[in-house]
Amino acid sequence: MGKYSVPESIRKQKPKGTMVKNISGYYYVYKYKSVQSDNGKRSTEMGKIIGSIKPDVGFVPNENFLCDSEISTLEFGEYAVTLANSHNTLTLLRECFNPKDALMIYTVAVIHFIQGFTYMKDIKSYYEMSYLSIKYPSLKLGYKSLSSLYDNLGRRQGSVIKMEEKLIAGSSRQLAIDGHVIGCTSNENDLAAKGYKFRKIKEPQINLLMAYDINTGIPLLSRIYEGASTDKVSVKDLFNQVELKNMLFVIDRGFYSTDNIKLFTRDGNSYIMPLGKNLTTCKQAVSSLDMAGRFMYQQGRKATVIEYKDEMIDGYRVITCRDLNESVAEQTNYLRHMGMGEKGYTQEGFDKLKDFMGVIVLQTSIMTKIPQEIYEIYKKRWTIETYFKYFKNKADCNSLYQQDYYKTQGLAFIMLVSALILREFEDAVAAVKGKSVQDCLLDARMVKADKRRGIWAVCNCRKKQVELFETLKTKLAVEIE
């Protein structure tokens, strides 16, 4: 037996499709494959090392060898219920993109929806470990493919704008617009800059600007802007992305400027906007809080009385409202802090502020609606806070490493699609008594797909999961497109 030969007893212990090398008396196992050269001759090509053979033990794999083997158990439940209840989003994508891109965008957005904000480098792993990999087996979701997808979404926006225009056309034409700050830890990001929240987040930021339908909750537009740019500047660009005519905009005080007032009233548009307390118009409105008008406002099971006055100030319609329940709650809270002796809470301060507690000053260009209607429309705007809470807490994108401008805009679109999936799934979950979106995903997560003798089958189905799947109209079976 030669110095480098491998004994028969050792060769018998190697896995199929591998070869053994004797190196200094140790037997290392490598993958190999047969290849054919240009002249037609076949030869053996050695691959990477996967372990070793110890004569008294047998084959001992490397720690990462199992990671390279075929996956036999997949995350099924949460992906199955999501796919079954987001058909409209996929259909819309297929109407605006080619079939391959539509499916790729949809799959990535599903992963963002279920797993929370996910970096491009991690998308492939989630895909391979989930039902998505057998439902859509042809997809390539490596970093290079995703990088190209994000770049194209940000650079070639024809299909993106087509989809956003479809969303706008199908909306109630009552839109809320608001911004969301995202911390960005990449020093090379074209959009990252120190913004107004730098002291709080202690890193540069980029700003996500969103528009959504206040009546249906469906997101309509999404763009990311430079961190140093304010919302009232960025909104001008957002308005130029798609045609916005005959819309009612319900917007936050951060968008106030003389130029934006003109922007919000052109092309048949109108607006409702709360005024900041430092604005002259607001100061004039609260200089007298003699409110003769009253109406009841009800949201869900809660009801309150709203006092109001309606007047014209410098050519603008201004409606000043006081929520009596909120006023009492704020006064109670102030007195509680004062009773505890906390600094800054004094009787003098209470006497100065009490008349302003629960008060909001709204400016609007609408002249045909009564104050109660204006107030009720404005209150719908606050559902956007829940929407951004999803991005902040579930789709946790508070620390972003994206560097390229176009890829960052591509990410903004992926987040829009993820939010469309969320909205569609929320409608389905409404049929599940006493359960939230997260409750349903968590319960569904217990259901796995196992591969046994070459066939995928669903397992770990307790009565609770079976009932959930029935309510969400989801088949407890592995399906492949």
Image (cartoon, rainbow, N blue to C red):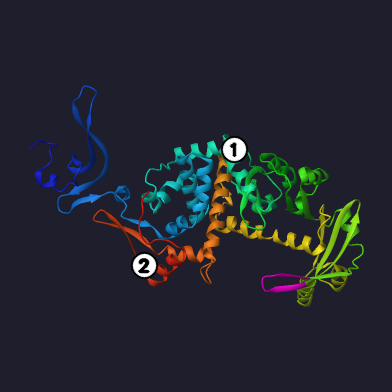
Label 2: which residue?
461
Quarter of the rendering occupied by the N terminus = top left
In the rendered structure, which amino acid carries the disc numbered 1? Answer: Tyr
Q: What kind of secondary structure does the magenta stretch mostly adopt? A: strand
In the rendered structure, which amino acid carries the disc numbered 2? Answer: Cys
Residue 32's label in the rendered image is none
- Residue 276 on image: x %, y %: 81, 55
Q: Which residues are magenta?
A: 296-304
- Residue 390 on image: x %, y %: 58, 58
Label 1: which residue?
405
Residue appearing at x 15%, y 53% in the figure: 56
Decide if residue 364 is on the left or right side of residue 166. right
- Note whether 142 is above or below 480 in the view shown: above
Q: Is residue 302 magenta?
A: yes
- Residue 303 on image: x %, y %: 73, 73
Question: Can you see residue 403?
Answer: no
